[in-house]
Amino acid sequence: MSPDQSKESANTQATNDDGLLDGLESLLEEEGMDLDDDDDDLDDDELDSLFDDDDDSADTSAPVASPAVRSRSAGRSARGDRRSRDREAFQNLDAQMQLDPQGITISEDKLTATLTRITVDNDYEGIMSFLRGQGISSGIDQEGIRAAISKAYRGQGSYGVVVARGKAPAIIKEAKVAYHLPPEVIDKNNTSEKMTDFEVLKHILEGPHIETLKSYKGVVKPVTAGDLISEIVPAEIEVGEDVFGNPIEIEQEEELYLQMGDNTELSEDGMTCVSAIYGYAGILDNIPTVLPPIWVTEDHMEARFVYVEPPEGIEQPAPTVKDLHYLLEVMWIRNGLMEKQFQLIQQRLERQQPLPATLPIAEGTHEVPGDDAQINYAFDAFSVLPWNHIQTILAMQSAEDISEAIDNIYADEDTPTFTAFGPGQVVIEKTPATDGSIGVDVQGEKVIPEPGVDVPLEFGEFLAEDKDHLRCRAQIFGYVCLQWDIQVMLLSPLWISPDKTRVYFLNLPQGSNPRYPLLEEMQLLLKDLEVTYGFHAERWAEIREELENGQRDDSVILIAEGRPAQPGRDAAFDWAVDVGDEKKIGKVLEDGSIDFRERNLITVVQENDILGRLVPPQPGVVGKDVFGNELRPPSPVNIEVVTDSRIYAEPEDDGVIAFFAEIGGGISTSTKEKKINERLSRRINVGVNPISNIEGDIDYTTGNIEFNGDVVIGGSVQPQFSVRATGSVTIEGYVEAGAYITAGKDIIIKRGVIGATTELVAGKDVMTKYIQEATVRAGGNVRVGSYMFNASVRTGGQVVVTGKGEGKSRALVGGLIWGARGILAKSIGSPYNTGTKLVAGIDPESVNRAEQIRANMQTCNEKQRTMLERIGVPSLDVALIKQKLAFCRSPKDKQKILMMVKRIAKVAELEQSLQKELEEIAEIQRKLALQTYISVHSQLFAGAELRIGEQTKIVNDDEERVTFSLVQDDDEQTIQQGPYKGAMR
């Protein structure tokens, strides 16, 4: 056993022991005892004494030789004793032989008698008297006795002298089984795979093809009932005699028995086997067998007498009519017997005249199969418009399109026309299947005919079966068609417009006898469609009359019309000032700087200027469809205007509200849309923010800037100074090393940003000429006009580096550039800087949130462990907690545990919610990764490391005008390289 197996076995045993001990403890607890109680019946000394040896009194004082010494001493002693006994026995042997009394030995079969010795003390008469006394009287060897006595007188005693020999019995001739059959038929020792002639005949008689009998050339033995087939010839035996004169019968090792095959009988003594019927006798598997000369067809509808011409010298016995009847009875044939054929067979064989190979002697009555059901149509099923054409008509979305489709289909004069049926008219009729007539085979068994195959009435919409399931009738007025070109159905002639305001009659082309719905039939059609509004009976009567008179041939006719709903008017906010697009990006000049003239940075208003008017929505007019249902117009879009405290509102006529600026400043606005109960709602946030205009630099003359609104700086931000604004920050100059800029919205810098300790944080976009070694964090896009060098950039939008102006040959070099929605650059990397790392398809904010969730989940786990320890449970196992509750000493203790369990459940619920949020973030990240890409307009240098989603790729060779994206193939994701895509704006 291996060490692992030993360990496993030990562990299993330990587990079993623990389970057993637990069971014993439970048992003792049920009995009111504790395994750890001190009042046990046996103390430790008494338990130890149970394992002491019983033979403490054995004497151990005498010295004992070692096992090896004792073994050698015993061996030498035994050999010495044996030699002494052998010498003594040899010396006393002659004396012992003289002293033993005279004895005789009779063999087990009593055929020999042997004296133990003949010595000088014996004489002939004494020996003969001794033999007679023993009862030995047969086969005495007198000469042998005298010869042994003579030898004894010469000093040569004889020992073990055979003095009488009996006579063993002998078999003169063995018993055997004698067959009264031609030698060709007795082929008992056939060991080849080839069948014997008799086996071939049996195969023909039991097979389906009696024609093969014509080629049969084998030898047969015709027999009648009682003819001898085989018998046992007894053995000839000579009786023996033992030395006591008793006769000895021979015991035959194997007794012969006659075997009885089909259609044979044994005599009462079992010595003869005779035929039980008229037939052909032979040997099958070493067993006498008689084959009845009857062949029956597989369907048991005909029986034939089989005649095989016997070999020359053997007469064919003639069967009696009774024999033939018995034969048929044996074969269970009792119906359709041909008595005249019986007489013919008997007469011809009595005259030794040959017969045909087979003669019919019984014939059954054949069954008559039933007729299949037949389906009859009340229309020409081979002249029906194909289903795909009907589908084309029904797929149209307007009455005009339906009319055009019908005209196009019937542009060909050979197109099949429609047949119309009214309610109650028979469309399909079935002739039912019949059962047929029962037959009777030659064995008297009924032969059930194959019934006719029933064909179900297959039908579709607007058809119904009669109770007898033999007819299908139309339920409504309609045009017959074959759905999917298989199933008969009626096509309703009515079509309802998608907006449910109109019902049209489809006047499809019919044959020479067109039929149009009666008023009652039309009302039934409308009722079936639940149309309750807009139909006028008088108008339909006029239309029907026009159709019957040939005065109207429209393909689509309006017969019912509802009242369409009138849409209302959406709410609107009409701006009185030009707010433009806050996210409009300024133009990038050829040197890479930002042209502020091409960007409406701030819309400025003065005190009491009107900002705009909110026009309320106007509801529409309710309509009614043809089903009688109200048609409500779509709800108009509602607009909610949310303003800050620097804006006031005044009502005007017709519910219009005007909004005014309470102070001068810059307008900030944003719009959000959402659907609530399928109703679109729009919220416009409008604010007036103070504007801080600083003409020069941010330095010691201004100090750090912190402003609730927009900040416009005419110069640069000097080293180590900071600007914080809730709105946008616009800088005409540079951001020097060590500066810190944070904005609730955009940060726009006309020149550039430098410094490893410089940091920009924007709630929306960042736009500048260049970024060198600085740290940038943005919620929107980061757009750089010239270049980016060794920067650390993370944004929830795109990173775009256009590569204009100075340094344009190397647009993006070094650093970690992270654009959640993609990276576009004129060039990436450098032959001398291989440390460029690009990340796309991963939202930085989502990553931060995921890390926070994992930390919170870890806190939940620790909290759970602490609470579980307080209630004394090692793990969050419901069974263990239930067990803990079951063993509470008091209701108060139980309540404490329940309160703790409730807290644990709350923590578990929180953890589950965090896990769900984590999975949602992961799913969003996966989708984002598949939608984003990294694109290089010009040149990508080797050594750059790319990451999109969870996949990474190192660029090993220089590339030009390429795009990298994430491709999903089954469960595997790879970064794939393709041609350049993405406009450099």
Image (cartoon, rainbow, N blue to C red):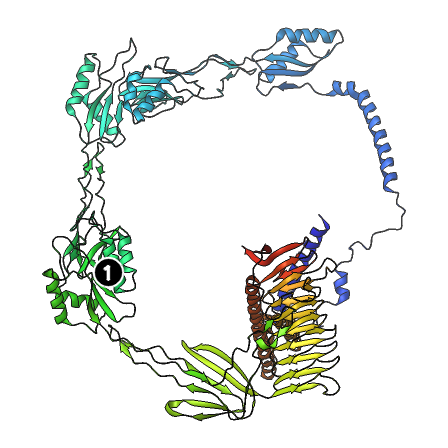
Q: Residues within 10 Å of mark 1 (few under 14, many from 20)?
A: some
Q: Secondary structure at mark 1?
A: helix
The amino acid marked with disc number 1 is Ser
Image spot of residue 229 (x, y percent): 33, 18
Image spot of residue 695 (x, y percent): 67, 85
Front residue (pair 516, 707): 707
Residue 707 shows up from this direction:
no
* Residue 601 placement, left or right of 678: right
Vertical side of 491 occupied by 201: above or below:
above
Vertical side of 763 occupied by 487: above or below:
above
Residue 107 shows up from this direction:
yes
Residue at position x 66%, y 7% from top? Answer: 146
Image spot of residue 637 (x, y percent): 40, 80
Residue at position x 25%, y 55% from top? Answer: 408
- Which residue lies under the disc numbered 1? 403
The quadrant of the rendering that contains the C terminus is: bottom right
* Residue 923 placement, left or right of 350: right
Front residue (pair 432, 798): 798
Quadrant of residue 723 in the image?
Answer: bottom right
Front residue (pair 597, 687): 597
* Residue 327 placement, left or right of 25: left
Vertical side of 199 occupied by 145: above or below:
above
Vertical side of 370 occupied by 565: above or below:
below
